[in-house]
Amino acid sequence: MQLRIVRRSNSRRGPARPELIGVGIVNEALLEAGLEHYRRGDRDEAETWLRKAVEADPDEPTAHFILGLMRFEAGDAEAAIRSLQRVVALRPDHAVAWQTLGDLRRHRGADPDAVEAYRKATQLDSKLTAGWIGLSQALLACGDADAALEAADVAAGRAPSDAAAHMTRAAALSRLGRRRAAADAYRSAADLAPDLATARVGLAVEQLQLGDAASAAASAERAVTLDPSIALGWLTLGTALRRTGDWPRACLALERSLALDPSQHAAALALGVLCAMTDQTALAQRWLQRAVELEPDDAEAHAALSSVYCADDRFELGRAHAEKALALDPTLLAPRQNLARVLVRQGLRDEAKLHLDLAYRDHSFQVAPAPHEIQRVLLLVTTDQGNTPDRYLLPADRFTRIYWCVEYADEAQTAALPDYDVVFNCIGDQDETGPTAANVARFLRSCRGPVLNHPGAIARTSRHLATSLFSGVEGLVTPRTARIAGDEIAAVGLLEVARRAGVEPPFIVRPVGSHGGEGVRLIAGSQDAAAPADGRDRYVTTFRDFRSTDGLYRKYRIVFVDRRPYPYHLAIGPRWLLHYNSGETVREPAHLAEERRFLEGPEATLGAPAMEAVREVGRRLDLDFAGLDFALLADGGVLLFEANATMLVHPEDPGGPLAHKNAFVSRIVNAFQDRLARAQV
């Protein structure tokens, strides 16, 4: 009896349909009838005739072989293995039978047993390429990458034109971390089989590992064009496009990957992170929650979800996921930052500092490389909240950002800083510079590049210094502001300390170092003046009613780039503590139209004297990037709220009601990037 396999497959799906030639003595007619029905696809009739052949000759190997394959096709892999074990027992010298048994065992996940079968096959026939390929794959599944590579080398050496041999060799090389050699092997497979999509996917994965995102994107694009059903191909394409800065197409590719295979943790995580980067908060939460569901012990997923929750002011959830991430991986930076932020909000500043110390003591700078780099910017930052928001000023696809948390810097870290073209001092709140001042001063003495927003200019922007900084600016009204000490407030009361500083009710009180309206109150009299219990210093500022004739409050924002003013927004609402997103501007078409008029012609809106006062504020600030919040009084005067470098500039949803702002946001961003370019010359 002879068995011959004309076509083989090395897929984990099991052996491909073979064409068998059987030559028997006793039951040749029964076998031929069974084979004919098998070839026609008539499985029931084939099994009937093959069973008769077995009854006629229980030691007939061909019948057992085909019955085994039929059992596999019917989904009964265990019965298939039993049949093939019967075959090799009858014909222990038949290499193809041993190889097929190896294929079936590997399909069932019995990789050590598969190795045994493949070794037997290759010992019987050293020219059996498929046996060497199967052996390499099974060894790799068992974790023996070195032996897997040896087997794959034999397969590729015996069949240099066999794409499957090169694919198997590439997989072993990849497992061993030999990325360039793995990429070359995948490229060889793709050259031999141009329509083999999996070869292109493997090549793309290795190109990503080698840092060549553009080539990886091209390889993955080719793969999904050849076979749009490969989920890994879409995942690889999305990852590569993200690294090249093509975020919209990256999102589409990752979504396609998850549509094909919803169980892909890596795709859900990547899509969640990408949605967070593009301000799609709800989608980011959805996909990161999915990533956590798929891999509950993935620290990176918990860390990313923590960041998204904190950015959305859902601080309890942010804290929970930060703590989970750190329990899984105490070395992660982002969850420590998030946890510290939550603890500060809860007044637990000492506990927050412990986390910051752990996060930054040995890692005071981090690099965010840009795929299409045009400039490398060193950003001086602090662990507190008083940093100039840089995310939209420095697009991640073109500006490599080197974040340096300066209060943790020492001389060794200063010497180890990566190369940079320009320095942007993001420590924009003078009240947060205390822990950084000495280190910044030491750095500036040896700084080898231009510095934007020089710390000396930032030092003049504290709220209580505004009266002196802007003294004599015609048309500018600067309310009296004083900084009062927390221990004095606790000793004699808020109202009394404010009066001693020359500030009478009504006045506004806010914690020093707070932003976004946190902790801000209006004190109209003794009934409102309960002393805060947290011991923090406060600013007190004389309040002036700035309602317009229609009874609404208006707050204008101008952004200065290189001392020049650019209109940014107009917030309108019924309350004096006015924030753009909490006002009525977005909901009222008339208010949106009024804002548009301000953006298009600020001088026409404010009047020439007020606009000149605004320009003078920019000149007095003497900063490369800063902002001014103010109101316009009935007599045309400019009522100053704050002027500093911590102003956020960001684009709006292009399909939303605030899309009209984006052209003006672009003017600000472009002007700042021009300033960066000119600074480097």
Image (cartoon, rainbow, N blue to C red):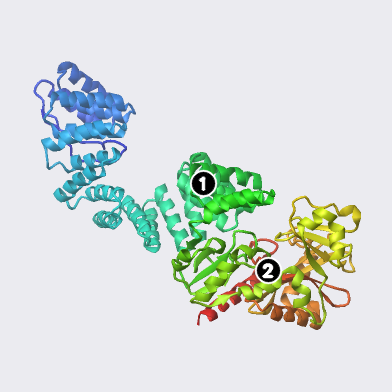
Nearest to the eye among marks 1 and 2: give it: 1
Task: Tell me: 463 left or right of 90.
Answer: right
Question: Mark 2 highlights which residue?
Answer: 661
Q: Residue at x 80, y 57 (%)?
A: 488
On screen, 441 above or below 113?
below
Identified by mark 1, the residue type is Ala
Q: Is residue 394 visible?
A: no
- Look at the picture and state if 209 lies above or below 321: below
Q: Which mark is residue 26?
A: none
Decide: few, some or many residues near mark 2? Use Cα within 10 Å; few <14, some 14-19, many ≥20. many
Q: Residue furthest top?
A: 55
Q: Quadrant of the N terminus?
A: top left
Residue under numbered circle 1: 301
**As drawn, 276 above or below 42:** below
State the image coordinates of residue 322 (x, y, percent, origin top left): 57, 46
N-terminal label among 1 and 2: 1
